[in-house]
Structures are given as C-alpha cells and as structure tokens.
Amino acid sequence: MEHLTEDNVVTLRELAERAFGGKSIIIINVETGEAISGGMIVDEKKARATRCHGYDIGEGKKMLWSKGIIGTLNLPEQKRFCKKGIDIKPMKGRLKKRITALRKAGVTFK
C-alpha cells in the first residue's frame, strides 16, 4: 500500500475526474439495492453556475445530475444546486434498458 505524501495526495475533484471522466454515474448500495441519491460535491462553484440535467425515469421519479457533483442529486441538493434550471429528457434507448434492468434486479429509486 502506498503511503500518503505531499507528492501523491490528490483532491477529490482530481480523483473523480480520473475515476469517472466527468460522466454521469449512479451509485447503488449493493446491500439494500437502493440507488443512492445525494452526490459528492467536488466543485460547488461549478455546480451552482450550471443547469442541472437528467431524466424522467417513470413512476413519478427523476434522476438529476449537476456538473461539479458526483452521483445523482437528492431533493435538498436539487433545491440548492438547480436554481439555474433543470433540463429533463425522457429515458430512451440504452438508458431505458439499463434502468429497466436495474429495476428488474431489485434496485429501487427514491
């Protein structure tokens, strides 16, 4: 295991960029099968300055992201970071297949 030194410490933002490359991600609790809502804020300024975006995933639920935050937003985060607006798209194609497969596998969305 590598020891932390000044030379190998990275910020959460750098780690997220390396790990996820700026992609929208869903975090799932594998023990409960629930999609985790509530993101990891890595750039609050960017999150506040940009519009939120996401999908209507059916059953009265929406899955939203904001630049500067890893993971989907919970309701308090939506109120805090989506003041510039929200761009909602319907699910289609591969995303619709993935969400349907996740639901069939027992994953629930709040």
Image (spheres, helix red, strand yellow):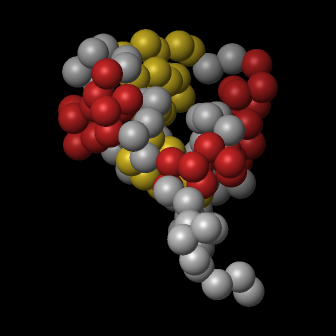
Nearer to the camera, 43 or 28 = 43
Is residue 75 visible to the viewer in this orientation of the structure? no
Above or below, comparing residue 81 to residue 92 in the picture: below
**Quadrant (top left/top right/bottom left/bottom right) for the N terminus:** bottom right
Extreme residue toward the front, this view: 7
Q: Position of residue 64 (x, y in %)?
A: 44, 31
Q: Is residue 5 left or right of residue 98?
A: left
Residue occupying the point 32% across, 39% down: 44
Q: Position of residue 87 (x, y in %)?
A: 43, 13
Residue occupying the point 64% across, 84% down: 3
Residue occupying the point 60% across, 54% down: 15
Q: Position of residue 104 (x, y in %)?
A: 70, 48
State the image quarter where residue 30 is shown.
bottom right
Residue occupying the point 44% across, 36% down: 68
Above or below, comparing residue 81 to residue 13 in the picture: above
Q: Position of residue 46 (x, y in %)?
A: 37, 29
| Number of numbered discs on residues | 0
Q: Is residue 102 left or right of residue 27?
A: right
Is residue 23 visible to the viewer in this orientation of the structure? yes
Nearer to the camera, 103 or 63 = 63
